[in-house]
Image (tube, grey):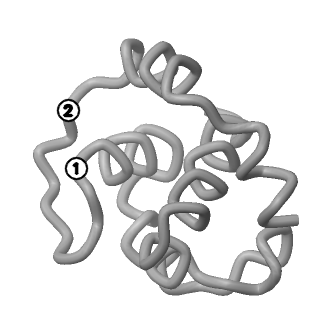
């Protein structure tokens, strides 16, 4: 599924999505600010636990693991854009 989400991702879609997200000002080591902002918008304070939880739709990898690669980051961002707000 990582390949599916990676192919679905585009910078244009992400930038459009992020244009509706306010800065959370929450800093988490190893998590890019845009990803932290998007996750906080969707999950609130629960995001801190979620980033270390395996995501079954993304081959059981955690957000932290996905952010270690370019394709993983794209897949995670595409997945976040599909999460209900």
- Of residues 34 and 37, which is closer to you in this image? 34
Task: Using the rendered view, name the quadrant where residue 55 is placed.
Answer: bottom right
Residue bearing mark 1: 33
Q: Is residue 38 left or right of residue 31?
A: right
- Of residues 44 and 35, which is closer to you in this image? 35
Residue bearing mark 2: 23
Q: Do the CB atoms of the residues marked 2 and 1 lie less than 8 Å apart?
A: yes
Q: CA distance from mark 2 to mark 1?
A: 8 Å
Q: Quadrant of the N terminus?
A: bottom right
Residue 22: percent from left, percent from top: 27, 24
Question: Residue at 60% across / 85% down in the picture?
Answer: 53
Relative height, residue 54 to residue 23 (above, below): below
Q: What crowding class fits label 1: few (fewer than 14 Cα within 10 Å), some (14-19), or many (20 or more)?
A: some
Labelled disc at residue 64 = none
Secondary structure at numbered mark 2: loop
Q: Quadrant of the C terminus?
A: top right
Relative height, residue 11 to residue 66 (above, below): above
Secondary structure at numbered mark 1: helix
Question: Residue at 48% across / 73% down in the picture?
Answer: 69
Q: How many marks?
A: 2
The mark that comes first in sequence, 2 or 1, is 2
Relative height, residue 37 to residue 70 (above, below): above
Task: Using the rendered view, name the quadrant where residue 38 is placed.
Answer: top left
Residue 8: percent from left, percent from top: 77, 38
Q: Is residue 43 left or right of residue 28?
A: right
Residue 43: percent from left, percent from top: 50, 52
Badge nearest the viewer, 2 or 1: 1
Question: Residue at 55% across / 74% down in the picture?
Answer: 66
Question: Residue at 70% across / 42% down in the picture?
Answer: 83
Relative height, residue 65 to residue 85 (above, below): below
Q: Is residue 28 left or right of residue 47?
A: left
């Amino acid at each position: 599924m990582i390949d599916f989400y990676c192919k679905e991702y585009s910078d244009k879609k992400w930038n459009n999505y992020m244009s509706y997200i306010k800065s959370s000002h929450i800093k988490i080591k190893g998590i890019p600010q845009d990803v932290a902002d998007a996750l906080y918008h969707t999950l609130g304070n629960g995001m801190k636990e979620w980033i270390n939880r395996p995501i079954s739709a993304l081959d059981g990898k955690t957000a932290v693991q996905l952010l270690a690669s370019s394709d993983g980051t794209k897949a995670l961002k595409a997945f976040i854009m599909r999460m209900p707000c």
